[in-house]
Image: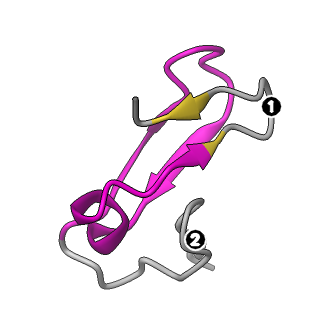
Amino acid sequence: MEEKKTCLAMNTRVTNDKGSVSFLCPSCGKYEIVRSKHARQIVSKYTCPECGFIGPN
Protein backbone atom coordinates (compact mmCIF):
# COMPACT_ATOMS: atom_id res chain seq x y z
CA MET A 1 0.00 0.00 0.00
CA GLU A 2 1.31 3.43 -0.96
CA GLU A 3 2.11 5.94 1.78
CA LYS A 4 -0.23 8.95 1.77
CA LYS A 5 1.88 12.06 2.24
CA THR A 6 0.35 15.17 3.80
CA CYS A 7 1.63 18.74 3.63
CA LEU A 8 2.92 19.74 7.05
CA ALA A 9 1.87 23.39 6.69
CA MET A 10 -1.52 23.02 5.00
CA ASN A 11 -2.55 19.54 6.27
CA THR A 12 -3.61 18.47 2.75
CA ARG A 13 -2.70 15.33 0.81
CA VAL A 14 -0.06 15.82 -1.87
CA THR A 15 -0.53 12.54 -3.76
CA ASN A 16 -1.03 14.13 -7.21
CA ASP A 17 0.47 17.56 -6.49
CA LYS A 18 3.21 17.94 -9.12
CA GLY A 19 4.86 20.85 -7.30
CA SER A 20 5.08 19.17 -3.91
CA VAL A 21 8.42 18.32 -2.29
CA SER A 22 9.60 16.20 0.61
CA PHE A 23 12.92 16.50 2.40
CA LEU A 24 14.48 15.79 5.78
CA CYS A 25 14.34 18.57 8.35
CA PRO A 26 17.28 20.92 7.74
CA SER A 27 17.94 21.14 11.48
CA CYS A 28 17.66 17.62 12.91
CA GLY A 29 17.60 15.53 9.72
CA LYS A 30 15.22 13.03 11.34
CA TYR A 31 11.71 14.07 10.25
CA GLU A 32 10.50 14.10 6.63
CA ILE A 33 9.01 17.51 5.81
CA VAL A 34 6.32 17.42 3.09
CA ARG A 35 5.31 20.67 1.38
CA SER A 36 2.54 21.16 -1.18
CA LYS A 37 2.95 23.36 -4.21
CA HIS A 38 0.48 25.88 -2.75
CA ALA A 39 2.29 26.04 0.63
CA ARG A 40 5.56 26.71 -1.20
CA GLN A 41 4.01 29.42 -3.39
CA ILE A 42 2.55 31.35 -0.45
CA VAL A 43 5.66 30.68 1.70
CA SER A 44 3.60 29.08 4.46
CA LYS A 45 5.58 28.34 7.62
CA TYR A 46 5.99 24.81 8.99
CA THR A 47 7.31 23.45 12.29
CA CYS A 48 9.27 20.21 12.58
CA PRO A 49 7.49 18.04 15.17
CA GLU A 50 10.80 16.37 16.04
CA CYS A 51 12.97 19.39 16.94
CA GLY A 52 10.74 22.48 16.67
CA PHE A 53 12.59 24.01 13.69
CA ILE A 54 10.44 26.64 11.93
CA GLY A 55 10.87 27.28 8.24
CA PRO A 56 11.03 28.79 5.74
CA ASN A 57 12.96 31.76 7.04
Residue under numbered circle 1: 50
Q: Which mark is residue 20?
A: none
* Residue in the foreground of this view, choosing between 51 and 55: 55
Image: magenta residue range: 19-46
Q: Is residue 43 above or below residue 41?
A: above
Q: Amino acid at mark 1?
A: Glu
Q: CA distance from mark 2 to mark 1?
A: 16 Å
Q: Position of residue 38 (x, y in %)?
A: 30, 73
Query: Residue 5, located in which quarter of the rendered image?
Result: bottom right
Q: For the image shown, how many numbered marks are present on the structure?
A: 2
- Residue farthest to the right? 50
Q: Quadrant of the N terminus?
A: bottom right
3 horizontally vs 35: left or right: right
Q: Residue at 65% across / 26% down in the picture?
A: 53
* Observer-nearest of 3 and 46: 46
**Disc 2 target residue:** 6
Left or right: 51 as drawn, with respect to 4: right
Question: How dense is the environment of label 2, judged by Cα within 10 Å: few (below 14), some, or many (20 and up)?
Answer: some
Q: Residues within 10 Å of mark 1 (few under 14, many from 20)?
A: few
Is disc 2 in contact with disc 1, using a CB cutoff of under 8 Å? Answer: no
What residue sits 56% from the left and 62% below the top?
A: 9
Indicate yes or no whether the magenta region holds residue 51: no
User: Which image quarter holds the C terminus?
Assistant: top left
Does the magenta segment cover residue 24? yes
In terms of sequence position, does the residue under pointer 2 or pointer 1 come before the other?
Answer: 2
The amino acid on which the numbered mark 2 sits, given as a three-letter code, is Thr
Q: Residue 2 in the image: x percent, y percent? A: 56, 76
